[in-house]
């Protein structure tokens, strides 16, 4: 096998490695956690599910962001009867004071086994609202705002519309 | 007896035009182009470009007032509507022009597909065009998220979940990519700098290649694909004037729609809920998402992109007429029908939750 072919095989292997989904990397024996939902409002509840863990290991769970680390709680991984792997399902409330932004939920054992998951925190619904149509419930309704425009502005825009349309038509219909 | 040569007096505008022509070489744009290049189907790309100029100008204005932070984004859009000078009007023109541009870019792609304008020697320009289509849809998607209303927040949720499915390839969309900068801020960067920069590079290449190869020949039963640079009875300055004319019409339509139906803004987004439908250009994916979940949003566009990329490779005959390319035209037509029907179904069916 010449050098050129070996180099191509190495490149292909590297390419496949890059394309491999994260799930493949997180194979049996490597603890992992999942957060549901992945985007939540400050003050709301999240569910953290741990898997591929060692039975009896204690995990300290924290919410880590640019401004520091916020402890969420401590839990122990347990295995179901007959299963080699252990895990946990816990629910925590994201502190209402959490600033909106990108966070990492980190579960770590005293031995240093770590599992992480991403969490995006938005402002609490009441804080994010502005204007008269404030709602703390998710809604597909439009945000009601006063969008009336002064008569002068409407007149000027109407003139611009007419000029643009007339100019456009003249240019489009102009003979070559 | 002596004689003197006298030049006829010139009008002021003519003198200005001559002065500019001498210094800028404007006569260089009057190169020959075929007459069919000035018809509406062959002007769709140029109309899209004119729309992008409106989008850039209005986008620069909006960026002065928009705050790309999850906590303040929606408030800043409210301020644009209620407080910024002409903010509601300019935001609405930006919104409506974006809708028009998505329509014209899709029609432009269909015109190129059905008239065989992707054939040799224009294959690479087809791929550049696909890149421009992807950039346009990327701009439409990021623009939707930036509002941070319920629709925007749900789009962001779909984005994050799609990135998870993509694994390492979706790393940029992960919140963990940058702990110092929220994903929303980075999507604004994409909307206002990264994608426009890519658009600039791609459109420059697109125009350069159109100039190099010329407009594809008019479709007749025996027409074959070939370079036409330097051919034709018309001139590019005529083409350019029509492009500008249609650009003014786009502006007039966008302004009229802005007065009649101002750009929508939903309630502030509440995380964890799914109560809105995606924007019309993505709603065709909704029925598939209902069946296969968010992974459909990754897999189906990827399959469609691969099929579009294969078009110049599979259809290698030189003929432009659709009647000589029946298989491709029928398959493309069927896919188009499925997309349209899916969009109608997606519009009519009730909202269902898909996010994990």
Image (spheres, coloured by chain):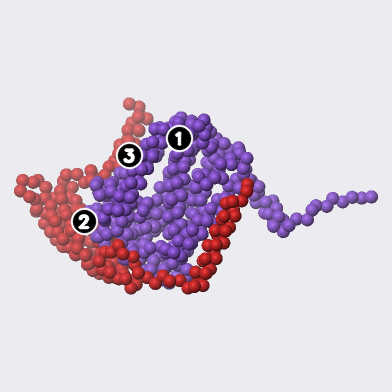
Q: Give the chain letter at badge 3.
A: A
Q: Residue B118's x, y, as percent?
A: 47, 37
Of badges 1 and 3, the one in the foreground is: 1
Residue at x 54%, y 36% (from the top left corner)? B217
Q: Position of residue B327 (x, y in %)?
A: 39, 32
Q: Chain of mark 2?
A: A
For numbered disc 3, what is the local secondary structure?
helix
Q: Residues within 10 Å of mark 2 (few under 14, many from 20)?
A: many
Residue under the point 72% across and 59% down: B12
Q: Residue B198, position in %: x, y?
A: 45, 50
Q: Residue furthest top?
A: A1
Could you say which is closer to the camera, residue B8 or residue B246?
B246
Chain letter, colour purple: B
C-alpha span from label 1 to label 3: 39 Å
Q: Which chain is red?
A: A
Q: Are marks 1 and 3 in contact (CB under 8 Å)?
A: no
Nearest-to-viewer mark from 1 and 2: 1
User: Residue B198's mark?
Assistant: none
Left or right: residue B4 compared with residue B295: right
Q: Please, is residue A174 above or below residue A96 in the view? A: above
Residue that numbered label 3 is attached to: A15
**Mark 3 Cα-neighbour bin, 10 Å: few <14, some 14–19, many ≥20:** few
Disc 1: which residue: B322
Do callouts 2 and 3 point to residues on the same chain?
A: yes
Q: Which mark is residue A35?
A: 2
- Report the Cα–Cα distance between label 2 and label 3: 29 Å
């Amino acid at each position: 096998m010449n050098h050129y072919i070996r180099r191509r095989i190495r490149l292909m292997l590297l390419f496949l490695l890059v394309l491999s989904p994260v799930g493949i990397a997180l194979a049996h024996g490597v603890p992992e956690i999942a957060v549901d939902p992945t985007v939540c409002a400050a003050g709301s509840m999240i569910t953290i599910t741990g898997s591929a863990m060692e039975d009896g290991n204690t995990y300290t769970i924290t919410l880590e962001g640019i401004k520091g680390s916020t402890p969420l709680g401590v839990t122990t991984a347990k295995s179901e009867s007959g299963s080699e792997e252990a895990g946990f399902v816990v629910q925590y409330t994201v502190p209402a004071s959490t600033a909106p932004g990108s966070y990492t939920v980190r579960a770590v054992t005293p031995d240093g086994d770590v599992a992480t998951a991403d969490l995006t925190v938005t402002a609490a619904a009441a804080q994010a609202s502005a204007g008269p149509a404030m709602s703390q419930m998710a809604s597909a309704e439009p945000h009601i705002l006063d969008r009336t425009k002064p008569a002068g502005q409407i007149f000027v825009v109407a003139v611009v519309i007419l000029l643009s349309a007339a100019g456009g038509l003249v240019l489009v219909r102009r003979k070559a | 007896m002596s004689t003197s040569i006298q030049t006829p007096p010139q009008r002021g505008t003519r003198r200005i035009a001559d002065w500019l022509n001498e210094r800028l070489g404007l006569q260089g744009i009057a190169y020959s182009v075929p007459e069919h290049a000035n018809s509406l189907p062959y002007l769709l790309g140029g109309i899209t470009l004119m729309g992008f100029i409106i989008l850039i100008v209005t986008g620069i204005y909006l960026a002065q007032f928009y705050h790309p932070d999850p906590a303040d984004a929606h408030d800043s859009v409210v301020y644009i509507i209620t407080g910024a000078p002409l903010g509601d009007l300019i935001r609405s023109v930006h919104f409506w022009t974006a809708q028009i541009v998505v329509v014209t870019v899709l029609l432009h792609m269909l015109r190129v597909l059905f008239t065989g304008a992707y054939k040799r020697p224009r294959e690479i320009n087809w791929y550049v065009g696909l890149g421009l289509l992807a950039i346009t849809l990327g701009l439409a998607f990021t623009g939707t998220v930036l509002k941070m209303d319920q629709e925007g927040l749900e789009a962001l949720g779909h984005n994050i979940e799609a990135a998870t499915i993509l694994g390492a390839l979706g790393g940029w969309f992960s919140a963990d990519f940058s702990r110092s900068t929220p994903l929303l801020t980075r999507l604004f960067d994409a909307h206002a700098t990264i994608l426009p920069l890519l658009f600039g590079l791609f459109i420059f290449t697109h125009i350069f290649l159109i100039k190099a190869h010329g407009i594809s020949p008019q479709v007749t039963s025996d027409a074959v694909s070939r370079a036409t640079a330097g051919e034709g009875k018309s001139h590019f300055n005529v083409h350019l004037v029509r492009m500008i004319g249609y650009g003014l019409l786009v502006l007039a339509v966008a302004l009229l729609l802005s007065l009649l139906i101002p750009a929508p803004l939903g309630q502030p987004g509440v995380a964890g809920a799914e109560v809105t439908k995606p924007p019309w250009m993505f709603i065709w994916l909704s029925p598939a998402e209902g069946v296969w979940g968010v992974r459909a949003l990754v897999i189906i566009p990827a399959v469609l992109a691969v099929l579009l990329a294969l078009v110049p490779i599979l259809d290698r005959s030189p003929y432009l007429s659709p009647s000589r390319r029946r298989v491709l035209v029928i398959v493309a037509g069927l896919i188009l029908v499925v997309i349209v029907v899916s969009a109608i179904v997606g519009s009519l069916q009730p909202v269902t939750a898909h996010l994990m």
